[in-house]
Amino acid sequence: MAISSTPTRKLSTAVDRREAVLHAAGRVFAERGIYGTPTAAVAKEAGISQAYLFRLYPTKNELATALVERMHERILRTFAEAAAKAKAAGEDPFEAMGDAYVELLQDRELLLLFLHSHAAAPSIPAVREATRDGFRRIVELVQRETGAGPEDVQRFIAKGMLLNVLGAIDAPSLDEPWARLLMGEDC
């Protein structure tokens, strides 16, 4: 029996394609925003037809919502891993999660997607609901992992939101007293 030298082609599943589309959409939405990105640009970035994009995600809002859910999953996974490592080492999980978030924000795409999702939330109900659910789950994780009370959790989330804004305006690159103060550095 002869062995074929023709390589076998691996067919990608709809799950694989959806993931590839989310990666492409993340890049384009981060650059152009949810409103400013036509679905044709996402399809082009993903290397698929716009018709196939709509088979995977029937509307642009469904695509944006899936991206917001994926973004929150990444944050949750990062926080959970940081808290587990900190606890195993006898360290403060609050500090570990904060450091992990600062590290996450180095990913400019993630930072911009986070900001764009907040901008879209008022007028896209599904994005608003996904964002609310993401925040609910983050708050619950922080409470569970730290045992902290409401004021400490609120302070932690508020500092994260401040870091989002400071990252968006590239405050960390500034050597100015106001920027250093807000970044938590000694002035």
Image (cartoon, rainbow, N blue to C red):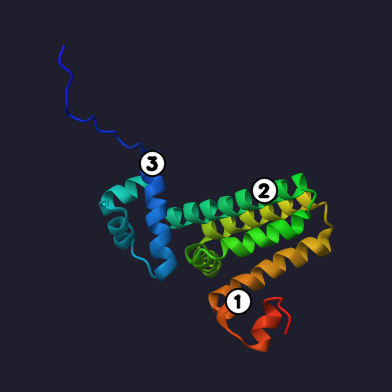
Q: Earlier in the sequence, mark 3 or mark 1?
A: 3
On the rendered structure, is 162 left or right of 104? Answer: right
Q: Is residue 55 left or right of residue 83?
A: left
| 3D distance between C-alphas at marks 3 and 1 | 35 Å
Q: Which numbered disc, 2 or 3, marks the residue that appears first in the sequence?
A: 3
**Quarter that holds the N terminus:** top left
Residue sitting at x 81%, y 63%: 152
Q: Is residue 34 visible?
A: no
The local secondary structure at tag 1 comes to: helix
Q: How many marks?
A: 3
Residue for badge 3: 16
CA gap, disc 2 and disc 3: 25 Å
Dot 1 or dot 2: first in sequence order is 2
Question: Which residue lies most toward the front here?
Answer: 89
Q: Position of residue 104 (x, y in %)?
A: 57, 60
In depth, the one of 181 and 28 nearer the eye is 181
The x, y position of residue 154, in whole percent, is: 76, 64
Q: Is residue 167 above or below residue 10?
A: below
Q: Name which residue lies at 41% across and 46% down.
A: 19
Of 139 and 120, nearer the camera is 139
* Distance from the alpha carbon under mark 1 to that under mark 2: 24 Å
Rendered residue at 41%/54% (across/down): 23
Amino acid type of the residue that numbered disc 1 sits on in the rendered structure = Leu
- Tag 3: Cα neighbours inside 10 Å, few (<14), some, or many (≥20)? few
Q: Is residue 179 left or right of residue 74?
A: right
The picture quadrant where one finds residue 159 is bottom right
Q: Is residue 7 above or below residue 111?
A: above
Q: Could you say whether the residue bearing mark 3 is in a helix, strand or loop? A: helix
Amino acid type, residue under disc 2 in the picture: Ala
Residue marked by disc 1: 166
Q: Which residue is mark 2?
A: 80
Q: Give the secondary structure at mark 2.
A: helix
